Image (cartoon, helix red, strand yellow):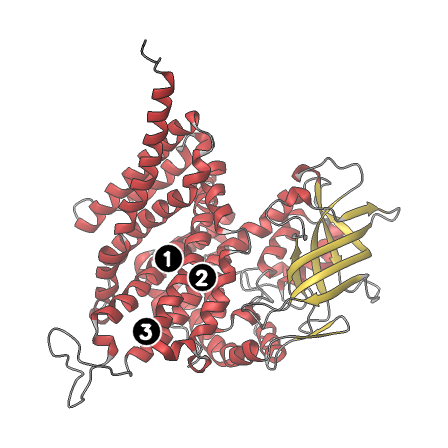
């Protein structure tokens, strides 16, 4: 079965849980974007994704991209699907109208990309960086570059890449060696090689705009010496630039997306932003991309859950323990959906989908507020949320995409391990999301070491207090969420004190800390879901996942909290022992 978006699920989170429509209408650019318009956009997006994008997913995986003589041919159906994507105006959903976009909220674009990734992850990789490239050029490009490239990127007429990684420089971008030499006409001459470039070459668009991290002459060593260059595949005069794809990778998954090794042989480019400020310009693109990778994780898990849920509702095996299920009838075996072990898998993954959706959609709403709220303090609060929560979502959602999809494969038994049902593709495709756009380990370190500890946890504490204030302590679920948020606030102080004695400690417990943050925020999300107004059918559909969250997911909070606290206590004890003089013999 192909993936089909369920707009009713996303509308429930957006409207009933997050109360998004009035919050969006309070922002000047979206004053006319009422609930009816939002619903219409989501319904049309769901139809487009199901009918135009999902059908080519299997060919994308089984046939994949072909490479010959420097050219890449995408799988059957990809060019037609991408052209329909452009013709429908979907690439520019949230881009400004003056740039050819539709000027709609970023949260609607976020939902669109979640569904696209679930339906056809390989194809979605092609436009996946458009939003980031657009934001990067919008904020840092010269007027000339914006006039030439911005609307082409906004509308998806031309696709874009993010060229960071080199064979010796992955997470450590300070080692980048690609060189850019200024020319008399104001251009740059770019030389070097990049690897793992998604969509570095393809046949979907006539031009590809490469944003290349490079080093100019006399630049200092390390990350502060990096600049950003825009290097197009085709130059403004129509000539082919000296940009070459040397090969595409043979990968575990994502066969529909060409992952390219690129070579720049004196290619012509232009500086984006200021010399030596390339990472600052690039981070606009990377932070946007990281939220979209989190949404990829949610979409892939939803796709896996849909397959497993449908299979469990048809497959019969043995008798289920407990009460006789109504679905038994005269059958000799019960549906595996009635077996507690399978029910636990399905409800647990559904709990992750709904909980992470709530947090991801809230983050997308915060992006809209950070850009458009008239109140500077509200913009500052929104930006703080995005800065702190984006790495949490990127790491946790992609982790669950892979491990949760593997659990969903388990529902199929041996049938899941063969290609027929398509569940094994999701497991393979999801694995890379834990690696690209900053590995999950880097996300955890970024969160704790670079964002939480430098201000003594004040920023994170402010975010947690905002969540606390949105809860009602008279409700049991809300009170439990409040308690966990308070424990998380105290944990930041505990780590900060222990780090004085052992500066390595935060790096060791960063992943555990990120999981504690995610689970506390998930507790908040599920408290909000439980309290939302819902029909009887909606409430019944979430009864199992709500129980699964509290029985099977939330206990990890106490485990991870204990790991971090014991690590901190061990440091304190060692520190005290070191200060105690040895007793006389």
For the residue labelled by badge 3, is the local secondary structure a helix, a strand or a loop? Answer: helix
- Give the CA separation, mark 2 to mark 3: 19 Å
Residue named by callout 2: 297
Q: Earlier in the sequence, mark 3 or mark 1?
A: 1
Instruction: Give the image location of residue 304, x and y in percent.
Output: 39, 71
Foreground residue among 343 and 199: 343
Q: Residue furthest front?
A: 585
Q: Residue furthest top?
A: 584
Residue named by callout 1: 356
Whether residue 33 sits left or right of residue 313 in the image: it is right
Residue at 27% across / 52% down in the picture? Answer: 554
Is the C-beta separation of discs 1 and 2 under 8 Å?
yes
Q: Residue furthest right?
A: 184
For the residue labelled by badge 1, is the local secondary structure a helix, a strand or a loop? Answer: helix
Is the C-beta separation of discs 3 and 1 under 8 Å?
no
Q: Earlier in the sequence, mark 1 or mark 2?
A: 2
Q: Quadrant of residue 328?
A: bottom left
């Amino acid at each position: 079965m192909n993936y089909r978006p369920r707009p009713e699920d996303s509308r429930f989170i957006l409207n009933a849980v997050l109360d998004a429509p009035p919050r969006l209408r309070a922002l000047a650019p979206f004053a006319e974007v009422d609930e009816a318009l939002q619903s219409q956009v989501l319904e049309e997006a769901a139809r487009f994704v199901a009918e135009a994008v999902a059908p080519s997913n299997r060919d994308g995986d089984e046939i994949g991209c072909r490479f010959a003589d420097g050219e890449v041919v995408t799988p059957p159906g990809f060019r037609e699907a991408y052209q329909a994507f452009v013709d429908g105006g979907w690439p520019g959903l949230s881009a400004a109208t003056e740039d050819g976009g539709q000027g709609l909220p970023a949260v609607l674009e976020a939902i669109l990309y979640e569904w696209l990734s679930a339906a056809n992850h390989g194809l979605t990789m092609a436009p996946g960086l458009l939003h980031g490239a657009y934001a990067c050029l919008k904020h840092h490009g010269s007027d000339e570059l914006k006039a030439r490239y911005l609307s082409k990127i906004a509308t998806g007429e031309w696709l874009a890449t993010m060229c960071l990684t080199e064979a010796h420089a992955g997470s450590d971008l300070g080692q980048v060696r690609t060189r850019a030499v200024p020319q008399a006409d104001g251009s740059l001459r770019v030389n070097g090689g990049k690897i793992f470039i998604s969509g570095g070459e393809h046949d979907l668009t006539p031009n590809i705009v490469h944003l290349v991290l490079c080093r100019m002459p006399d630049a200092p060593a390390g990350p502060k010496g990096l600049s950003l260059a825009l290097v197009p595949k085709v130059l403004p005069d129509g000539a082919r630039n000296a940009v070459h794809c040397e090969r595409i990778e043979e990968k575990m998954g994502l066969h529909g997306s060409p992952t390219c090794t690129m070579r720049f042989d004196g290619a012509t480019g232009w500086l984006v932003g200021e010399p030596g400020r390339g990472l600052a310009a690039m981070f606009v693109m990377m932070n946007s991309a990281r939220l979209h990778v989190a949404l990829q994780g949610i979409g892939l898990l939803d796709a896996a859950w849909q397959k497993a849920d449908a299979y469990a509702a048809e497959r019969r095996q043995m008798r289920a323990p407990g009460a006789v299920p109504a679905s038994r009838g005269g059958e000799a075996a019960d549906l595996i959906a009635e077996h507690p072990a399978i029910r636990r898998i399905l409800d647990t993954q559904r709990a992750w989908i709904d909980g992470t959706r709530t947090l991801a959609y809230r983050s997308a709403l915060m992006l809209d507020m950070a850009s458009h709220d008239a109140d500077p303090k509200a913009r500052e609060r929104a930006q703080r949320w995005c800065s702190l929560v984006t790495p949490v979502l990127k790491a946790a959602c992609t982790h669950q995409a892979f491990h949760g999809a593997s659990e969903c494969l388990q529902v199929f038994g041996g049938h899941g391990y063969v290609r027929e049902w398509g569940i094994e593709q999701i497991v393979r495709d999801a694995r890379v999301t834990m690696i690209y756009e900053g590995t999950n380990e880097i996300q955890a370190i970024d969160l704790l070491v670079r964002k939480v500890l430098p201000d003594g946890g004040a920023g994170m504490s402010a975010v947690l207090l905002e969540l606390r204030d949105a809860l009602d302590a008279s409700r049991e679920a809300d009170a439990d969420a409040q308690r966990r948020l308070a424990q998380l606030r105290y944990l930041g102080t505990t780590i900060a004190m222990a780090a004085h004695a052992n500066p390595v400690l935060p790096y060791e417990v960063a992943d555990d800390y990120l999981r504690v943050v995610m689970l506390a925020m998930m507790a908040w999300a599920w408290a909000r879901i439980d309290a939302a107004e819902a029909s009887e059918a909606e409430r019944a559909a979430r009864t199992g996942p709500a129980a699964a969250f509290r029985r099977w997911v939330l206990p990890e909070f106490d485990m991870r909290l204990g790991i971090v606290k014991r690590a901190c206590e061990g440091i304190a004890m060692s520190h005290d022992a070191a200060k105690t003089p040895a007793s006389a013999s």
